[in-house]
Amino acid sequence: MLITKLAALAEAGGPFGRFSHQKGIAGGIGVTPFLSWLRALDSHPLRGPVDFFYLYSGADFPYAQEITAIADHHDKVHVHFVNSSSEGHLTPEHVMATIGGSPEALSVFLCGPAGMVRSFQNGFRHAGVTSRHIHREYFDLR
């Protein structure tokens, strides 16, 4: 009988994302990469204003207090909490109307369920935001 102990190997890599401190839209667990840059604001000051839209459903609203506290200490951060259960689904048109300004000057960072992100990508392109200014974060390795 031959008994061999196998060593378990793990390899960690990353980070792979390319998010920066710009405008952000997060849906559900998509808040994760945005929390990282919100928490880093003291060491990475913002150059301009940031509008952060956080979509949630029902009572499931993780990190709301932390996000609000961070925004309260950074006057350039404007948080928009959107409960899709009671307010309906957020659309790129609603985002554009809320923040104002020219679509050509807008950078959008997205993270959330694939369908939501695809819908926002298409909607922002249709509204005039160039593809190179629409960024998304994936929850998988590329």
Image: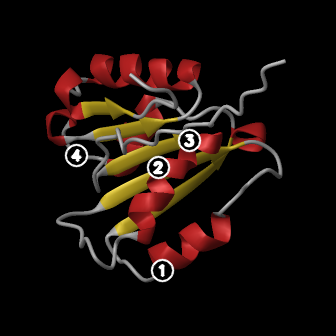
- At numbered mark 3, what does the secondary structure look like: helix, strand or loop? helix
Mark 2 vs mark 1, foreground winner is 2
Determine which of the numbered discs, if any, sits on residue 30 in the image. Answer: 3
In the depicted structure, whether residue 99 falls above or below residue 13: below
Q: CA distance from mark 4 to mark 2?
A: 25 Å
Q: Are marks 4 and 2 in contact (CB under 8 Å)?
A: no
Mark 4 vs mark 2, foreground winner is 2
Q: Return the residue at label 1.
A: 72
- At numbered mark 4, what does the secondary structure look like: helix, strand or loop? loop
Q: Quadrant of the C terminus?
A: top left
Give the image location of residue 30, x and y in percent.
56, 41
**Nearest the eye: 36 or 100:** 36
Q: Residue furthest front?
A: 1
Neighbours of disc 4 within 10 Å: few (<14), some (14-19), many (20+): few
Determine which of the numbered discs, if any, sits on residue 33 in the image. Answer: 2
Determine which of the numbered discs, if any, sits on residue 11 in the image. Answer: none
